[in-house]
């Protein structure tokens, strides 16, 4: 009986993948790491107000000459991935991407400042 099961499964494709060398596609509406488009933002702070986990703080940009107002800084450590910031933003300035590669040993990397570099690998 055992041998029968072994033989039956021996030539089947594995059910697992070699993560992190391989990954599976996320669902189309998966809510992952936030992308922020500072040029679209009008600093209305609606994202901050609707965030149920207080994961968003309005902070100054590093480039105060070009961006003189306050912009959202997102703490991924507090985020519950509800997507309300994206849904309520009147300018589509926040977009939750399909990036779920968020594990880190550096707690500072979970804070996303408003003028962060765009991640070119994102879809
Ligand atoms: S996804 Fe939800 S919890 Fe996370 S920052 Fe946006 S509003 Fe806050
Ligand atoms: S990201 Fe959107 S909701 Fe948040 S401050 Fe900018 S425009 Fe307003």
Image: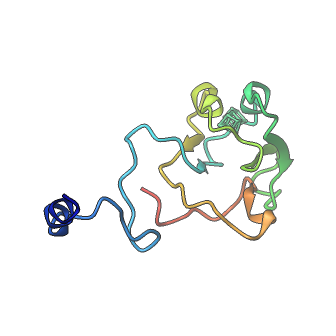
Q: How many numbered marks appear?
A: 0
In the rendered image, the quadrant that contains the N terminus is: bottom left
- Work out whether residue 77 or residue 19 is closer to the camera in this orientation and state it: 19
Q: Residue at x 30, y 59 (%)?
A: 15
Residue 85: x and y in percent read 65, 32
Q: Position of residue 77 (x, y in %)?
A: 76, 50
Horizontal side of 94 relative to 46 (left or right) equals left
Q: Is residue 30 above or below residue 51?
A: below
Report the front residue among 100 and 35.
Answer: 100
Which quadrant of the frame does ligand 1 lie within? top right
Q: Residue at x 69, y 67 (%)?
A: 104
On the rendered structure, is 3 left or right of 112? left
**Up-down: is 63 above or below 22?**
above
| Residue 4, position as x, y percentages in the image | 15, 61
Q: Look at 20% across and 64% down and name the residue there.
A: 13
In the image, residue 29 sits, relative to residue 60, either above or below, namely above
For the point 78% across and 40% down, the residue is 56
Single out the residue that lies furthest toward the front: 1
Pick the front one: 98 or 120: 98
On the image, the x and y values in percent for residue 28 come to 37, 41
Which quadrant: the C terminus? bottom left
């Amino acid at each position: 009986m055992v041998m029968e099961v072994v033989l039956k499964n021996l030539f089947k494709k594995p059910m697992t993948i070699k993560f992190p060398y391989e990954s599976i596609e996320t669902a189309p509406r998966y809510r992952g790491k936030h992308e922020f488009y500072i040029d679209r933002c009008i600093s209305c702070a609606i994202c901050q107000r609707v965030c149920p986990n207080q994961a968003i703080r309005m902070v100054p940009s590093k480039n105060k000459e070009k961006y003189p107002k306050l912009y959202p800084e997102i703490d991924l450590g507090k985020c519950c991935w509800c997507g309300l910031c994206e849904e309520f933003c009147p300018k589509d300035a926040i977009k939750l991407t399909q990036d779920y590669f968020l594990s880190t040993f550096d707690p500072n990397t979970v804070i996303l400042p408003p003028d962060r570099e765009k991640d070119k690998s994102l879809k």
